[in-house]
Image (tube, rainbow, N blue to C red):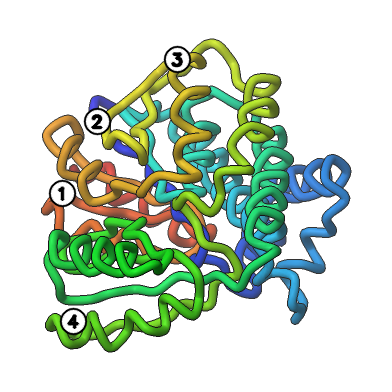
Amino acid sequence: MSLKCAFVFPGQGSQALNMGKDFFENSSEAKEMFAVAKERTGIDFETLLFTENENLAQTEFTQPAILLISAIANRLFTQKTGIVPALTMGHSLGEFSALVASGAIDAIDAVELVNLRGKLMSDACSKQEVGMLVSLGLEDDVVEDVCKKAREGGKQVWAVNYNSDGQIVIAGIKKDLEELVDVLKGAGAKRAMLLNMSVASHCPLLDSATEPLEAKLSQMLKDSFVAPVVSNVTAKPYSTKTEALELLPKQLVMPVLYKQSVKNIDDMVDCYIEFGHGNVLKGLNKNSTTKPHFNVSDMASLEATIDALKEL
């Protein structure tokens, strides 16, 4: 197939109870990946994902769970189609799933890696109450100016996720974010709302996590990529271990340029295929591209996506 496909992967916030259950019940490959991931990390992913519990909301468990389901979806699709992506890309945590799809890291190594990433992020935020807030309906420069003025006033808040036009997530100290809600609404935001997050991602509060993450990355990353990965930090593709070791630790403390990434690569691809639970990235992409967007989140959507690609 000559289609140029971008494989895209969701980040934290896309998790849900019973995600991946259809894969687990209908694929021996998925069952095996669950078992090996449990052996490696000590996390019982069946219990984590298929029973009511509080751990799924904790970042050290959320991150490996999301990556595992994304990696399973991608592996089953690739085995059935043989399609090699033109590019891979993820939102925040999803960039690590994108590395798996690009052959730059083994899937189970990546599960272990992001389990550590989640722990490092939690540890970095453990001594203060932090959070994240979404702003809807404001231009980027307006949100950036609001955050800058707040920091000049002694607040710790940063614009960190550029999801789509008019949607930006801000991270920082929770009480500072709470004070920002009315400021954003006063600036014309349609909505400003605190998110259910236990960490403050992609801001300087995570600086202590960068060095140990880089050390683990250095052990696990491979020297070859079958496809370039689009960096959240630069919104541009990279395809070497050296670049990955420079960019991925920075990703912890720098903004996610997601919408910029989509706009930068849109002319390079014919379609987007999202792997993992739901289709949250489809909602973000619609403001940045008119290219077709498919998702693989269970066995039915796997077959539907394969059939749809035949029509392109």
- In the picture of the structure, the residue carrying the numbered disc 4 is 189
Compare residues 222 and 32 and report the one nearer the observer.
222
Image position of 237 (left or right of 48): left
Expressed as whole percent of the image width and height from the top left, the position of residue 11 reads 48, 55
Looking at the rendered structure, the kind of residue marked 2 is Lys
- In the picture of the structure, the residue carrying the numbered disc 2 is 4
- In the picture of the structure, the residue carrying the numbered disc 1 is 291
Residues at discs 3 and 1 in contact (Cβ within 8 Å): no
Q: Residue furthest top?
A: 223
| CA distance for labels 1 and 4 | 28 Å
Image position of 192 (left or right of 299): left
Label 1 residue SS: loop
- Mark 3 or 4, which is nearer the eye? 4
| CA distance for labels 3 and 4 | 40 Å
| CA distance for labels 4 and 2 | 37 Å
In the rendered view, tell whether residue 38 sits above or below residue 108.
below
Residue located 15% across and 43% down the image = 263
Looking at the rendered structure, the kind of residue marked 3 is Thr
Q: Can residue 205 be seen in this view?
A: yes
Q: Residues within 10 Å of mark 1 (few under 14, many from 20)?
A: some
In the rendered view, tell whether residue 177 sits above or below residue 79.
below
- In the picture of the structure, the residue carrying the numbered disc 3 is 240
Q: How crowded is mark 4: few (under 14 residues within 10 Å), some or many (20 or more)?
A: many
Residues at discs 1 and 4 in contact (Cβ within 8 Å): no
Image position of 156 (left or right of 93): left
Compare residues 138 and 52 and report the one nearer the observer.
138
Residues at discs 3 and 4 in contact (Cβ within 8 Å): no
Looking at the rendered structure, the kind of residue marked 1 is Lys
Expressed as whole percent of the image width and height from the top left, the position of residue 249 reads 52, 34
| CA distance for labels 3 and 2 | 21 Å
